[in-house]
Amino acid sequence: MTDTEPFYSALIIHNDSSRDTAADFEVIKELTKDQYDIYSDAYHEIDVLLNRNIFTYMKKTMGDLIKAIKADMEEMTSGKLNHSQPDDIVRMGIRMRSAALAFCSALHYHQEHTYTELEKLYGENSDTEKEVRKILNRLNEKSSHYRLMYHLRNTMVHHSMEAVSIHGTAQLDKDGNTIAVSTPKIDVKAMTDLDKKMKEKYREQLTALPDQTPDLLQYAVEAFKAANEANDKLLLKMYPNMKQSCATILEFDELFEKRDGVRATTTERSTNEPPPLKFSYNAWASNVVQYARRMANRH
């Protein structure tokens, strides 16, 4: 049985696999309980916003869409996907449309989740809610790509999944190697024809687009960029302590003096002899520290 005692510290977990196991953990600085609480609370706030926020899952759907397109190209290059085989085309279409729908739906979920969270934090019709609504409304106004992808979800869910069409080509280059390209398209005409609840002014705008079958990936990438920018703004409105939390995380990070390794905090250590010591610790995700650094550079 291991005996333990309270022990609060900043701990580094070394990434060097050549190190002795006993030296994997190194205490950088002992902390008071109050210091531990301050650092841990700051980390928890940013960790939740970055890694458990609905926007995190939107990022995942963006990545999955890119992976679906890459999978098409890899299968066409290797010969696994045969354009003359209907089953292969069906599989390709299901994969692509599923990825597209997931991303478009994530745009909806992000807005819905934001409004639900606003009401929990500030109640109905708060000044903060009005400010956040302005950010999201401007998102539709500023980004035609975001607005179209947002509406594409309505068409796919309520009318036809074929509002996204698959397009792929494969050919031999001068060296005899197969070069494949996958360029899924958005069927704008399907959107304007099928979605009867679409506002007439927006329907006219879409009908007037010179390209009625724009590139799905291009629109998704631009929509994601716009959503990402808006998300940064609304988080600062909804969570005004973010800046202070990021500053606290940076203060903790500076204890490590830029040393390579995973940052962690401890709450207990073993007292048994002989060493090595064993710790109860909470490792910090690197993207939380990196986000705090980016926030510091912005202001």
Image (cartoon, rainbow, N blue to C red):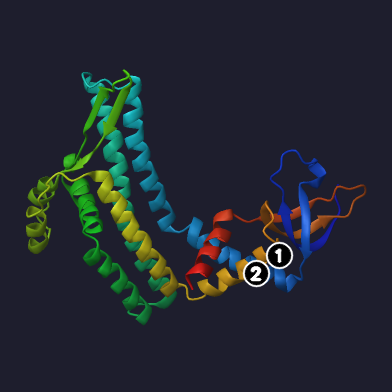
> For this view, does 168 lie left or right of residue 203?
right
Asked if the residue under mark 2 is in contact with the one under mark 1, i.e. CB atoms within 8 Å, the reply is yes
What element does badge 2 sit on? Answer: helix
Q: Is residue 165 above or below residue 239?
A: above
Residue density around tag 2, few if under 14, some if 14–19, many if 20 or more, within 10 Å: few
Residue most extreme to the front = 174
> For this view, does 295 lie left or right of residue 158?
right
> For this view, does 264 lie left or right of residue 2?
left
Which of 249 and 203 lies nearest the eye of the viewer?
249
Whether residue 285 is visible, yes or no, is: yes
**Residue at 21%, 59% in the rendered image:** 144
Question: Which residue is identified by label 2?
Answer: 251
Gap between marks 1 and 2 measured at Cα = 7 Å
What element does badge 1 sit on? Answer: loop
Percent position (x, y) of residue 216?
A: 24, 44
**Residue at 23%, 28% in the rendered image:** 169
Percent position (x, y) of residue 278?
A: 81, 50
Residue most extreme to the bottom = 127
Which of 136 and 76 lies nearest the eye of the viewer?
76
> For this view, does 7 lie left or right of residue 165?
right
Question: Which residue is identified by label 1?
Answer: 255
